[in-house]
Amino acid sequence: MTYGKTITIETQGFSDIKNITPTVQNVIEKSKIKNGTVCVCAIGSTASVTTIEFEPALVEDFKDYLNKFAPDNVHTRHGDTWGDDNGFSHIRASLMGPSTVVPVVNGSLLLGTWQQIIVVDHDNRPRSRNVRIQVIGD
Amino acid sequence: MTYGKTITIETQGFSDIKNITPTVQNVIEKSKIKNGTVCVCAIGSTASVTTIEFEPALVEDFKDYLNKFAPDNVHTRHGDTWGDDNGFSHIRASLMGPSTVVPVVNGSLLLGTWQQIIVVDHDNRPRSRNVRIQVIGD
Amino acid sequence: MTYGKTITIETQGFSDIKNITPTVQNVIEKSKIKNGTVCVCAIGSTASVTTIEFEPALVEDFKDYLNKFAPDNVHTRHGDTWGDDNGFSHIRASLMGPSTVVPVVNGSLLLGTWQQIIVVDHDNRPRSRNVRIQVIGD
């Protein structure tokens, strides 16, 4: 059995982090699937999905590290070629990947107590970002 | 068809690496699923799952690089706020993600000869760590 | 329903990047699966799968960053022990993970307009690389 929904979230870019755990849980409940997996996937090449303990201090720490790895003011061939200055966004997104898959058990996400599903929008401007939530199982 | 099992492993932290390939293969056999995928997911926000050639020299190399990216003695806002000094653990875990999905073909994991499934526990202390092995297919 | 195919691609190593999106879409069409997910997984411990805007300037930028993170001339214990000088390849592969899962909706990959599925071969020599494309859904 498969059930999916595309959601749209408003993001600010520069690895802005949004907690979408309640939305994912809601889609699982609508799916009537009790046991399986859910794939949460950012549609687009400058965003990622992962998990984090979603509290403000750590959210800032994580953004700092992404900025240390691929600084938002760095010179890239992509920026030179296309003039959109978001080479760093692409590099962060490709490194982390677009999606994460998490188990569904007894109709619920199986996560740790302090573990939330987040979308990380690496782009260099505010966007309306589409994310697919795809549930598979029985 | 879906079949899942939660296993518990003892870890030492600081990106301690455990090879769980035989356990994952065992769960696949119990599932009777011949073709599909298996999602292996760390439950908690300071651990990751990936694959590696599991030999002692490379295991140490990989831990060195995680420590170079997010050093275990680094100052974080998360540590300041909560006093648990494991900001680096969270940063490593969110970068790598909590789970990996691997194909199941003819009742077996489809991996390279020198490729094993590992849990990487990034936390800063020994833990009993729960990991979900979720098999989907027919 | 499950449908899978193993493809072989020729790669040059040092994080050589190949766009396999048309091949993945073709396997989805052969599978007759309309809604579900596709897991694309590199078989072997020195390659990864992710998504990128596949244009030449960005492809070079991304390779630069992988080389900044784990330089291809770095000294590793793995190289010392086995003499194959590809410790950096393993480190990049384990960090990025071997696989990516993407949604299938109405018989097609659900990706952004500028988002392609790529295999990144981190090894230090040309290879024939096996990649599994595993489709699940109905």
Image (cartoon, coloured by chain):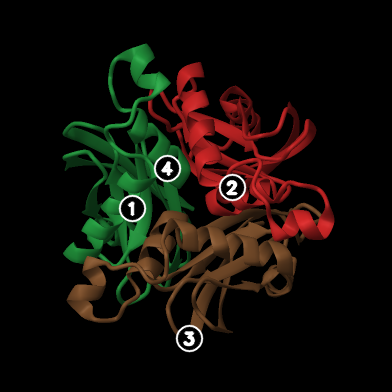
Chain colours: A red, B green, C brown
Please name the residue that numbered disc 3 is placed on: C127
In the image, which is nearer the foreground, mark 1 or mark 3?
1
| Residue B98 badge | 4
Residue at image point 38% right, 24% down: B76
Q: Nearer the viewer, residue A123 or C129?
A: A123
Q: CA distance from mark 1 to mark 4?
A: 18 Å
Q: Secondary structure at mark 3?
A: strand
Circles 2 and 3 on the same subunit = no
Q: Secondary structure at mark 2?
A: helix
Q: CA distance from mark 4 to mark 2?
A: 17 Å
Report crowding for label 3: few under 14, some 14 to 19, many 20 or more residues within 10 A (C-alpha): some
Q: CA distance from mark 2 to mark 3?
A: 27 Å
Quick check: marks 1 and 2 in contact, CB under 8 Å?
no
Name the spot of residue B137 as percent of width and height, x first. Answer: 50, 59
Name the spot of residue C122 as percent of width and height, x first. Answer: 47, 71
Please name the residue that numbered disc 1 is placed on: B65
Decide if residue C68 is on the left or right side of residue A7.
left
Name the spot of residue B42 as percent of width and height, x first. Answer: 36, 41
**Amino acid on which disc 2 is placed:** Arg
Report crowding for label 4: few under 14, some 14 to 19, many 20 or more residues within 10 A (C-alpha): many
Residue at image point 51% right, 25% down: A59
Residue B54 sits above or below residue A26 on the image: below
Please name the residue that numbered disc 2 is placed on: A92
Which corner quadrant of the image does residue B67 belong to?
top left
Chain identifier of the residue bearing label 3 in the image:
C
Quadrant, the C terminus of chain A: top right
Residue B105 sits above or below residue A74 on the image: below
Decide if residue C31 is on the left or right side of residue C71.
right
